Amino acid sequence: MKALFSKLWLLLLLPGLSQAQRRFELADISRLVNVSDPQLSPDGKSVLVVVSRPNLSTNRNETEVVLVDVASGQERVLVAGRPTVKQPRWSPTGDRVAFLARTGTGKEAHTQLFVQNMASGEVRQLTNAVENVQLYSWKPDGTALAYSAADAPANATGLARGNDSFEVGNGSVTLTAPPAPDHIWLVSATDGPPARRLTSGPLSLPDDSSAPFAWAPDGRTLACVLRPSAQTGDQETAVYTLDVATGTLHELPGSPHRIDLPAYSPDGKWLSYQTPREPPYFESLEFDVVPAAGGPARHLCRALDRNLQRALWSPDSKSLFVGGNDAATVSIWQQGLDGKSQKLKLGPVSPNGSYWVEMSVGKRNAVALTANEPGRPAELYYLPSPTAAPRRLTDFNHETAALALGRMEAVDWQSDELRPNGILTYPPDFDPTKKYPLVLMMHGGPSNASRAALYGLGQAVAAHGYVVFQPNYRGSDNLGYAFQRAIRDDAGAGPGRDVLTGIAMLEKRGWVDTSRIALSGASYGGFMTAWLMGEPRRWRCAVAAASVVDLLDSYNLSDNNIANAGHYGPSPWLSAENLAHYQAQSPLSRATRWRTPTLILHNVGDFRVPISNSYKMYHALKDNGVPVRFVAFPISAHVPGDPVRSAEWNRLWLEWLDRYLK
């Protein structure tokens, strides 16, 4: 295994630093162009992508839909000037493109569904939903579209009288109103009758799914995943078939729970869906297939041994294209129904997507994807076949690619019986004979992974003369099921050993300034930061962003509460033993050992990691005389997504590192 890694983890070299090149700066993060959501046309000749550019002046991410010709790479802006345009989708015949965009002003502003004629350019608004349209899908014959939207507030009558009280359920502490179920509607693609509701009642589409429903090829049935209620903690979903004519729902017998992403094969014989390998542990995901007419499920992708985030059927219905984190990259496999699989040869190209894989499959199994490389931010790539090499079609980020960037290296090491890996980013002028501060930047999740792909904040930190280390500790989803599940009932100690042995491995290289090592991370990366702050080793400083420090708060107050049972054990309120187990796994149990100067960053309305965690961390540090700064952002988000707050978040992060490492 070690020999295999030594061959795979080759240095990913970038052009050398020259006098004409300047380094990547913090401000360059706001110049990065995001390219996402590729959609191959039915004839395979062009690709739609969403292009987004941060605008600090307006504090908006300005988006447009761009049409890219596969043969020439020529680009044409198809949709622009519409707020938050997203989800472009070809009609089955390729003569129209649908998309979502925000329209209206003030309280009447909502995301609606539009369709544009490719020949005339005419744009029509199809929906007038009272709440935002979330997702949609073309009917196979192109005559209609199914879409999802939340119901109006259940307490609308009370609100009109000034009574905004609501009953609390299994949801986040940040809720200020009862969550409304997301339901499926049907709307004509032409001038037809008003939209028709297909589902109703307490059952709800999951609000965190990217594709919770899909058409059968005959257009008579939709497959969908529904959960018991709109409460975000009620995450046990099941697969249903929906008769479009009658609205009748039928639950698939024996379908596992906490499943997602249903999709029919083009020939209508099979239904695929994403499912956890071992419920109730929700994180190790794979794709099963069942006969559409009924029958037992097949664990089609089990042998790949990866946490798979996306699956797309091949046009001939003989295989699925699946993708997920894999070692130091994101990989895509063509998984045949016959059990055979092949990995696409993507080289340094790492497909984009957070808990998703940005790809599209078209005629003759051509693949379009948006991806990063170590020295190049997001662009559109194309493979004419699964055996071909990717060809870059766009150059939106050419200015960033021309900068003096830090080279990246994938490394691995031994920790207990496991072999974690991680990513290094060096300063552009790195000299191995000199000493450098080491900055740990730990990923969230924990079911996620750092990859050898350009990371803006990591490049900015490296450009300040620090080596950046992004360890993929146990619980990361890039090294197989056993590695991912090794975090169960061991939230901090085991992953902490992985990080410490990784640091020890780097110290043997001779260039680490052992007196200047900093910890940092967001979400579960913040958890790891807080946990490691409790180690006897003294760190120069730490940045803890959206950090989990008290697992009881995560269980009681988070939107993701029930999922915690997979990592930390059953409900802490079932026994004194369970309660003690949650407390022992919490970084807060080590708070009296914290002595590291710490910057805390958190959003007030963080639904995933309640800000109560950071208040506890702040007081634990302050009361013990440890230098601490706590900056809060008054928004409802896990991390900032708007340009201004994102830039400030990054500025504070780097400024704190400079304060203690320079």
Image (cartoon, rainbow, N blue to C red):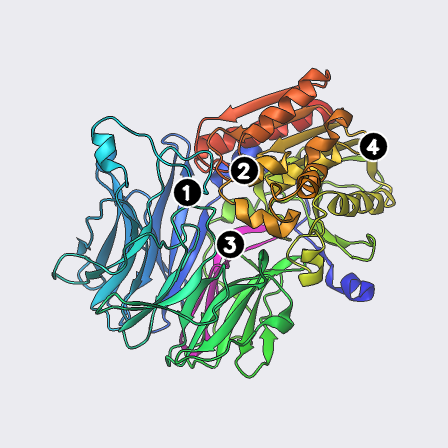
Q: CA distance from mark 4 to mark 3?
A: 35 Å
Q: Of callouts 4 and 3, which one flags the residue occurring earlier in the amino acid sequence? A: 3
Name the disc covering residue 63, or none.
none
First in residue order: circle 3 vs circle 1: 1
Q: Is residue 97 left or right of residue 327?
A: left
Q: Which residues are magenta?
A: 354-382
Instruction: First in sequence, mark 3 or 2: give its number.
Output: 3
Q: Residue at x 21, y 39 (%)?
A: 104
Q: Are marks 4 and 2 in contact (CB under 8 Å)?
A: no
Left or right: where 366 falls relative to 433: left
Name the disc covering residue 53, or none: 1
Q: Look at discs 4 and 3 and give the one toward the viewer.
A: 4
Q: Nearer the viewer, mark 4 or mark 1?
A: 4
| Alpha carbon distance from label 4 to label 1 | 42 Å
Residue 330 on the magenta span: no
Per the image, the residue denoted by label 2 is 556
Quarter assignment of residue 339: bottom right
Mark 3 residue element: loop
Identify residue type, mark 2: Asn
Density class for disc 3 (Cα within 10 Å; few <14, some 14-19, many ≥20) is: some
Amino acid type at mark 1: Arg
| Inter-mark Cα distance, 4 to 2 | 32 Å
* Residue 90 at x, y percent in the picture: 30, 64
Q: Which residue is mark 3?
A: 353
* Image coordinates for residue 539, horizontal then vertical, percent: 77, 30
Q: Which residue is mark 4?
A: 537
Asked whether 449 or 345 is in front, the reply is 449
Q: Residues within 10 Å of mark 1 (few under 14, many from 20)?
A: some
Residue furthest front in the image = 575
Location of the C terminus by quadrant is: top right
